Amino acid sequence: MIYKAEKPAAEVANVKKPENGAKAEPAAEPKENKQLADNNSTAKAKTYLVKKGDTLYKIAQQFSLDVNDLLQLNGLKKNASLQIGQKLKVSQ
């Protein structure tokens, strides 16, 4: 006779052995997996690569930002000059 398992092997391996005749329950999820899920769910800051002819004003308008917010987001001063290829954060 051939017997089929009720649960896939992956689920069976995650079951605690019952103590004193108690029912078997799935083991708690490892903390590492929860931590990884939390890290993956965080949004990454969007960046913009500066091109020839770009200005802080032009970039700020393109991303619906105030120039001062763009400066603060990137830790720049008001008289900052841009370099072609420079990465600017345009969202948090």
Image: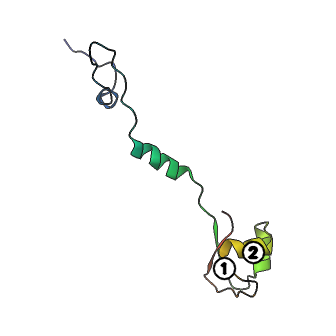
Residue sitting at x 34%, y 15%? 23
Residue at disc 1, secondary structure: loop
**Residue underneath mark 2:** 59
Residue 49 image offset from top left, x and y in percent: 63, 76
Front one among 11 and 39: 39
Going from N to C along the chain, the mark reached first, 1 or 2, is: 1
- Distance of mark 1 from mark 2, alpha carbons? 9 Å
Position of residue 74 relative to residue 53, above or below, is above
Indicate the quadrant containing the N terminus: top left, top right, bottom left or bottom right: top left
Residue at disc 2, secondary structure: helix
Colour mapping: rainbow
Residue 74 image offset from top left, x and y in percent: 66, 75
For badge 2, the amino acid type reads Ile
Which residue extends farthest front? 20
Indicate the quadrant containing the C terminus: top left, top right, bottom left or bottom right: bottom right
Position of residue 4 relative to residue 84, above or below, is above
For badge 1, the amino acid type reads Val
Instruction: Tell whether label 2 touches label 1 (CB within 8 Å).
Output: yes
Residue 4 image offset from top left, x and y in percent: 28, 18
Front one among 81 and 20: 20
**Residue underneath mark 1:** 50
Residue sitting at x 73%, y 73%? 70
